Amino acid sequence: MARGWLRYPQPMERPTAIIGAALGGDSFEDLISQAEATGAQAVQIFLGDPQSWSAPAGYPSEELRTAMERAGLTLYIHAPYVINVATSNNKVRIPSRKLLGYTMKVAAAAGAAGVVVHGGHVVEGDEPALGYANWAKALTEVSALNLSTPLLIENTAGGERAMARHLNSIAELWKVIAEFDAGFCLDTCHAHAGGLNMETLVADIMSITGRIDLVHANGSRDEAGSGRDRHANFGQGLLPGEVVARILHESGAPAIIETPGSNEDQAKDIAFLKNVLAGIA
Ligand SMILES: [Zn+2]
């Protein structure tokens, strides 16, 4: 190349998106060998039982950080499913904030790229506005922790009182929490099942949040608008994998697959996405 000639990066030379998988395992070594088996460049884990309120005290976050760094893996932590910071029910909201704070602290110590948490919902009889206000309170606590790891609020599939299912609710939530710099995790199965327009999805979300930090790239076993949260592998179910790949491409964000089956099934899903993405680029 001639000297002084600035060569602009061509679209084909753009770094390909990081694609990882939601994985478990008996140990960090097991986790890493599963990441190798699936071809995942990133892993998403729970710190403990996702249906349990008990925070795993004394979590070995430094050990996790070292293991991830050695393996060259990007780490995401998924907060437990029981967390619902939006609800007016004190018995759920207060422990939810506590457990979320703990999860955030461990994630930051482990060098995680983000903590994913579901948008939650209000109880019957409560105005959605109460849920948005409760979110603002939760984020006030989270931001007081001053952590480098961002909190990524994930869209959910079902329920009419959900904070992050329909676009209008996501928009209202984002207005109320604007000052907190929260991130967004876009789950394709949840968007499809939640009844969102998959053609305009990325533009619609970007116009509200201004960011998509992570895509949960999942197929769906159910029809659009079903409200059901049942993930499917690509090539199966009722959400074409090509649609998921296009959304991933448009978002420009890293992806985590949360598809069912064995490591082999997940390896196929990751290979499928990479293959389609290579064709788009
Ligand atoms: Zn998800």
Image (cartoon, rainbow, N blue to C red):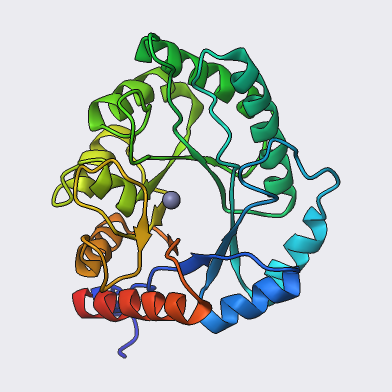
Q: Nearer the viewer, residue 24 or 256?
A: 24
Q: Residue at x 26, y 32 (%)?
A: 166
Residue 205 relative to residue 146: left or right: left
Q: Residue at x 37, y 81 (%)?
A: 271
Q: Quadrant of residue 209?
A: top left
Q: How many marks?
A: 0
In the orientation shown, which residue stands out farthest toward the bottom?
1
Q: Quadrant of residue 79?
A: top right
| Res 10 visible | no
Relative to 178, residue 166 above or below: below
Residue 261 relative to residue 147: left or right: left
Image coordinates for residue 207, horizontal then vertical, percent: 24, 36
In the orientation shown, which residue stands out farthest toward the right?
58
Q: Residue at x 58, y 75 (%)?
A: 35
Image coordinates for residue 198, horizontal then vertical, percent: 18, 50
Residue 266 relative to residue 2: left or right: right
Image coordinates for residue 259, horizontal then vertical, percent: 42, 65
Q: Nearer the viewer, residue 236 or 37?
A: 236
- Quadrant where the image shows the C terminus: bottom left
Q: Residue at x 55, y 40 (%)?
A: 81
- Quadrant where the image shows the N terminus: bottom left
Relative to 128, residue 11 above or below: below
Image coordinates for residue 160, horizontal then vertical, percent: 30, 26
Relative to 178, residue 243 above or below: below
| Res 49 visible | yes
